[in-house]
Structure formats: C-alpha cells, structure tokens
Image: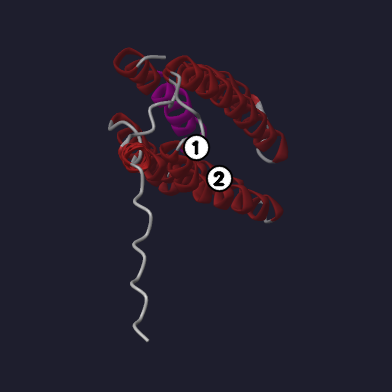
C-alpha cells in the first residue's frame, strides 16, 4: 500500500512574521539603549543634602552620632535620587524598569549591599576612621559599574569617587572633608552636567 503523501504545514501568515521581526528589533534596541534616567537635578539635591550632613558631622563626636548623621543623609539622598529618577523616566516616556534600567540596577546594587554590610561590621568594631574611604570607594564602584549602561559622564563620576576614596583610606583625618567633596561637590557638579546635557 502506497504511503500517504506528507501534508505540508500551514504557512505562517506574513503579518506574524512582521510582528516577530518587530518584537526582535524592539528587544535588541532596548538591550543596546543606554539608561538615561540618571537624574541630574536629583544629583544636585543629593549633593546639597551631603553638604548639610558634612557640616553637621564635623561638629558631632566621632562614633555613632557621626555615623547616624551620614546614614540619615544617605537615606534622604536615596529618596531624592529615586523620586527624581522616576520623574525623569516618566517625563521621557521610558519605563524605569526597562532592560537598560534593570542592567543599571543589577550592576549598581552589589557594591551598595557590600557597603551596608561592611558599615555594620566596622561599627561593631569601632572602626569609624575606615568608613569614609570605604563609603566613597564602594559608592564609586557602584556608580562606575552601573554607569557602563548609562551615559559616559556617569562612570567618569564614579572614577572620581574612587579616587577620593583611595585618598580617604590613607588620610583618615580628611574623611569628612573628602566626603563633602565627593558626596557633596561631585554630585552637584556632575548633576549640573547631566541636567544640561541629558535633560533633568
């Protein structure tokens, strides 16, 4: 008995080809696009918060009161950065958790988590003099790592933080001044640059 001829599969409609091609193009563009929601004015606000914290910390006794001032400032700066980042992404019509945003966050987070754990450990050991250098180095590392998926000025800012952190490790007496220069002045300077060149 002769074998039945194989039936050819149903041809895929041309509009489905077009939809699949458009989806592939969109996903490729999302992966290649830089994360542009880094907030310039948010950086300026973060810098202002750090300047106030630096002024207060220099008058505080070394130890937990000093650390608490900087940690409160860090929390306020994080809030300011998050709100302005959300506002910038919304104004630009780009989702904050786009592919580029997720890459930025995943690269930024490890150094920040490491800094948080080291802060707890150093506080238990009363190693207050190490904290300014450690904070500047790890924040700079986070900015540099996340900035590889953002505009070029962001990793440049991270490199400046790393440089200040290196100095702070070997000149612990300059800790507050170097943190004012980093978390205060660098945020303000680079914030203005980002706001003027890349909007917001």
In screen coordinates, is 87 left or right of 28?
right
SS type, badge 1? helix
Q: Residue 134 or 130: which is nearer the viewer?
A: 134
Q: Is residue 82 above or below residue 131?
A: above
Whether residue 102 is visible? yes
Which sits earlier in the primary sequence, circle 1 or circle 2? 2
Residue furthest to the front in view is: 1
Residue 175 — which label? 1
**Residue 122, position as x, y percentages in the image:** 63, 53
Query: Marks 2 and 1: in contact by CB < 8 Å?
Result: yes
Residue 77 figure quarter: top right
The quadrant in which the N terminus is found is bottom left
**Residue 18, position as x, y percentages in the image:** 32, 38
For the residues carrying marks 1 and 2, which lies nearer the camera in this image? 2
Q: Which residue is mark 2?
A: 131
Residue 62 figure quarter: top right
Judge whether residue 181 is colored magenta: yes
In screen coordinates, is 52 left or right of 178?
right
Q: Is residue 59 above or below residue 131?
A: above
Residue at 71% x, 54% y: name it.
124
The local crowd at label 2, few if under 14, some if 14 to 19, many if 20 or more residues have their Cα within 10 Å, is many
In screen coordinates, is 12 left or right of 175?
left
Judge whether residue 130 is colored magenta: no
Residue 154 figure quarter: top left
**Residue 90, position as x, y percentages in the image:** 50, 19
The magenta span reads: 174-188
Q: Residue 76 or 198: which is nearer the viewer?
A: 198
The local crowd at label 1, few if under 14, some if 14 to 19, many if 20 or more residues have their Cα within 10 Å, is many
Q: Residue 30 or 142: which is nearer the viewer?
A: 30
The quadrant in which the C terminus is found is top left
């Amino acid at each position: 008995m002769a074998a039945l001829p194989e039936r050819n599969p149903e041809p895929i409609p041309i509009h489905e080809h077009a939809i699949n091609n458009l989806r592939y193009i969109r996903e490729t563009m999302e992966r290649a696009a830089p994360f542009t929601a880094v907030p310039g004015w948010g950086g300026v606000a973060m810098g202002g918060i750090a300047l106030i914290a630096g002024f207060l910390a220099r008058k505080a006794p070394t130890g937990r009161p000093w650390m608490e001032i900087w940690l409160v400032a860090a929390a306020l700066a994080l809030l300011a950065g998050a709100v302005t980042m959300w506002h910038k992404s919304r104004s630009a019509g780009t989702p904050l958790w786009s592919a580029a945003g997720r890459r930025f966050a995943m690269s930024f987070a490890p150094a920040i988590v490491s800094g948080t754990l080291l802060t707890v450990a150093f506080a238990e050991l009363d190693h207050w003099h190490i904290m300014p250098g450690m904070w500047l180095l790890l924040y700079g590392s986070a900015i540099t790592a996340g900035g590889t998926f953002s505009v070029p000025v962001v990793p440049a800012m991270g490199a400046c933080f790393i440089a200040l952190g290196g100095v702070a490790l070997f000149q612990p007496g300059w800790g507050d001044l170097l943190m004012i220069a980093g978390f205060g002045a660098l945020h303000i300077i680079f914030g203005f640059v980002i706001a003027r060149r890349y909007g917001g």
